[in-house]
């Protein structure tokens, strides 16, 4: 007996299903973004700076989403130096704090991205930004 209710799961072509995050060579090196955008691609782009480099997110993105569509980690742990990519993603765990170039702490998972933001995810980049040197 077949169901008359259409599936709500989106259909993606083989090209859309491939992700730079899941390819063997990219995963082994840890390159590529953590998140790959598959929907809402027509929202207005917002330019921001991530660790001294130009980056782009979309209107309505959180800082966390904007960062993880650019790279695999949100920050480096201040205790171990290991990369962190957020934990709960809902503002409860304290794992996604990043800084702006002027030193302000920002909770990435619940802070909306604003055009022109200057986000720092590495301590070296914070020190370099404060001194005016290139990271």
Image (cartoon, rainbow, N blue to C red):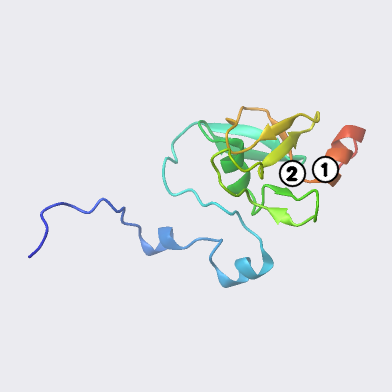
Work out how far the residue at label 1 is from the one at label 2, CA to CA, in angstroms. Answer: 7 Å
Q: Residue drawn at (41%, 45%), measured in percent from left and top?
A: 39
Check the image and report above or below for 108 versus 38. above
Q: Position of residue 65 (x, y in %)?
A: 56, 42
Residue 121's tag is 2
Q: Position of residue 8 (x, y in %)?
A: 26, 50
The answer to which of 34 and 40 lies nearer the viewer is 34
Neighbor class of circle 2 (other Cα within 10 Å; few <14, some 14-19, many 20+) is many
As helix, strand or loop, the secondary structure at mark 2 comes to loop
* Mark 1, residue position: 125
Q: Position of residue 54 (x, y in %)?
A: 70, 39
The answer to which of 113 and 107 lies nearer the viewer is 107
Check the image and report above or below for 86 versus 58. below
Q: Residue drawn at (10%, 62%), measured in percent from left and top?
A: 2
Q: How many marks?
A: 2
Check the image and report above or below for 4 versus 90. below
Q: Residue drawn at (66%, 34%), measured in percent from left and top?
A: 48
Kindly check if marks 1 and 2 are in contact, taking CB atoms under 8 A apart as contact. yes
Q: Residue drawn at (69%, 39%), measured in percent from left and top?
A: 97
Neighbor class of circle 1 (other Cα within 10 Å; few <14, some 14-19, many 20+) is some
As helix, strand or loop, the secondary structure at mark 1 comes to helix
In the displayed structure image, the side of residue 122 where residue 28 appears, left or right: left
Q: Quadrant of residue 121?
A: top right
Residue 37's tag is none
Quadrant containing the N terminus is: bottom left
């Amino acid at each position: 007996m077949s169901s008359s209710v259409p599936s709500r799961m989106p259909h993606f072509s083989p090209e859309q299903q491939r992700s730079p995050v899941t390819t063997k060579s990219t995963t082994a090196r840890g390159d590529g973004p953590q998140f790959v955008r598959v929907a809402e691609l027509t929202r207005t782009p917002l330019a921001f700076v991530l660790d001294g480099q130009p980056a782009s997110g979309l209107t309505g993105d959180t800082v966390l989403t904007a960062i993880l569509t650019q790279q695999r980690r949100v920050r480096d742990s201040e205790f171990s130096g290991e990369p962190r990519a957020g934990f709960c993603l809902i503002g409860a765990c304290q794992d996604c704090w990043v800084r702006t170039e002027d030193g302000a702490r920002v909770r990435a998972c619940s802070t909306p991205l604003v055009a022109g933001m200057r986000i720092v995810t590495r301590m070296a980049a914070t020190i370099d930004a404060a001194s005016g040197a290139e990271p």
